Amino acid sequence: MGVLEHTSRRFNTFLHIKTRIYRKFSYDYTQTRVLSTNYSNNAPILPVLIVGAGPVGLVLSVLLTKLGIKCAVVERSNEFSKHPQAHFINNRSMEIFRKLDGLAEEIQRSQPPVELWRKFIYCTSLTGSVIGSVDHMQSQDFDQIVSPVSVAHFSQYKLNALLTKQLEAIGFTIRNEGLNHRHLAEREILMGHTCTSVEPTDNFINVTTSSVTEGNHIVNQIPCRFLVGADGAGSTVRNLVGIELRGEKDIQKLVSVHFLSRELGRYLMYEKPGMLFFIFNPGAIGVLVAHDLKQGEFILQMPFYPPQQKFEDFTSETCKKLIFKLVGHELADINVVDIKPWVMHAEVAEKYLACDNHIILAGDAAHRFPPAGGFGMLICIFFGDNIGYIFLVSLRSLFFVGPNVSKLVLQSSLLGPTS
C-alpha cells in the first residue's frame, strides 16, 4: 500500500471516530481547585494548550485566537530554528493563509519570482551537463481560476517568523524564562519548556513541563481542557500517551546541509534556474533545494549509510568538499551555516485521539511523510485549520447546550457519520 493511500485511509478513520465527551467543560477559564496529586494550588484551566511551536502550532494559535478560544504554547527549543526545511506551499494552504490578516499576500510579496523556482533539474553537476528538466508548475497553479490564490515557494523558518509576527500583533508574548510560580496565561509562547508528563484527571489534563533558568531546573504544572501534540516527528506527547506509529520506518538516513553562496545563486539564476536539483556523479550524489537564488540560500540533502558512515563524518570541511564536487568547482564565498541529520519515514499514528478525545495529535506528530510532494507541512496546516473549528464547536456547544448536544454536533458536523 502506498503512503498516500495509507494516509488517506488513516485520515478517513479519524473523521469517523466517535466522540466521547461526557463532561461539561467551560468555554473560557474556570477557577477550580485542582485535584491532581502533584498540583494543589488554585489555577486557571486553559481551554487549549499546544505543545510545539512549529507551523501547525503557530497556525492553530492564530486561528483559535481569532475564533475567540484562549490558548497558549510550550516549545522545547530555546529559539526558533533558522534551518530551512519545508518550502512549497500549495493552493489550499495559501487559501487558509488568506484568512490570517494578509499572510498569503505577504508570502507572495516576499517569495522569489516564480521563474526562478518552477523547474526540477537533473544533472551530473550544477555547472555540468543537464540530464533533463521538468516544469512541475501548471497554469492552474497561478491563473486563480481553480483557486483564488497561487502556490508559493517560501522557507518554513520565514513562514514561522511571519506567524510569530502575527501572534505578537494579536497580543501573544514569546518568553524564554520560567513561570516563576505564576500560572501560564493565555497568549503566551514559552520557549525552552519540555513536556515531561501528561496526567488526565476527572475534569482536565494536567501537563508537566520542565525548563532550565539560570542553571535551575524548574518544573511547572499546566492544567488544560484540551492538549494538542504538535511537537514534531519525535513527538513527546505521542510517546507519553502511548500511541504507536504504523508504516515504514528508517527508509533512509540523510544529512541536511544549510549553506550560503551568492556566487552559486547568481550562476543558477542566470544559467539553470530551478527549485530542486537532483545531482548524480561518481564523486557525490545529492538533492539541492534552492530556497532563494537571489540570496544564495541552499539546503543540500545527502544520504549516508551506517555502519560504513556515520553523521559525525560530515564535518563542515567534508561538506564543503562534497558541495564542490556537486557544483563542479570550488566556491569562493561558501558558508556552511548548519549541518543536521534526519531520517526519512513513511508512518502514520494508529490513532490521533487519546484520553477521551481531549488529547489530539497534529502535524508530524500524527504522520511522518517522505519529503516528495511537500505533504508534511501542508497537511500540518490543513490539520491546524480543521482542529480550530472542531474546538470552536466543541467548547461552545458544551458551554451553551451541554455535553449530549455537543457530542451530536461533533459527530454530525465534523467527525462524519457514525456506525
Image: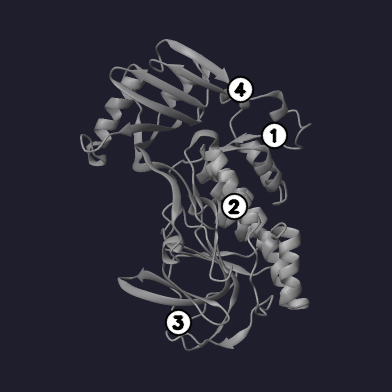
Q: Residues within 10 Å of mark 3 (few under 14, many from 20)?
A: few
Q: Quarter of the image holding residue 219?
A: bottom left
SS class, disc 1: loop
Q: In whole angstroms, how far apart are the C-alphas of marks 1 and 4? A: 14 Å
Comparing labels 3 and 1, the label whose residue is closer to the camera? 1
Q: Which residue position is annotated with label 3?
A: 181
Q: Amino acid at mark 4?
A: Glu
Secondary element type, mark 2: helix
| Image location of residue 379, percent across then percent down | 59, 46
Which of the two residues, 117 or 131, is positioned nearer the viewer here? 131
Inter-mark Cα distance, 4 to 2: 26 Å
- In this view, the residue in front, 96 or 360, is 360
Of label 1 and label 4, which has the lower sequence position? 4
- The amino acid type found where label 3 is placed reads His
Does residue 68 appear in the picture of this structure? no
* Residue that carries the numbered disc 1 in the rendered image: 150
N-terminal label among 4 and 3: 4
Q: Nearer the viewer, mark 1 or mark 4?
A: 1
How far, Cα to Cα, is label 3 from label 1? 47 Å
**Residue at mark 4:** 115
Can you give x and y, in whole percent of width and height, for residue 268 in the image?
48, 20
Category of crowding for the residue at label 4, using alpha-carbon neighbours closer than 10 angstroms: few (below 14), some (14–19), many (at least 20): few
**Image x and y of residue 139, in percent:** 71, 24
Q: Residue furthest left?
A: 308
Whether residue 269 is situated above or below residue 317 in the rendered picture:
above
Callout 2, which amino acid? Answer: Leu
From the viewer's perspective, tell me whether residue 173 is left or right of residue 231: right
Cα separation between marks 2 and 1: 19 Å
User: Which residue bears the numbered disc 2?
Assistant: 163
Identify the residue at image location x=43%, y=64%.
242
Which disc, if any, is residue 253? none
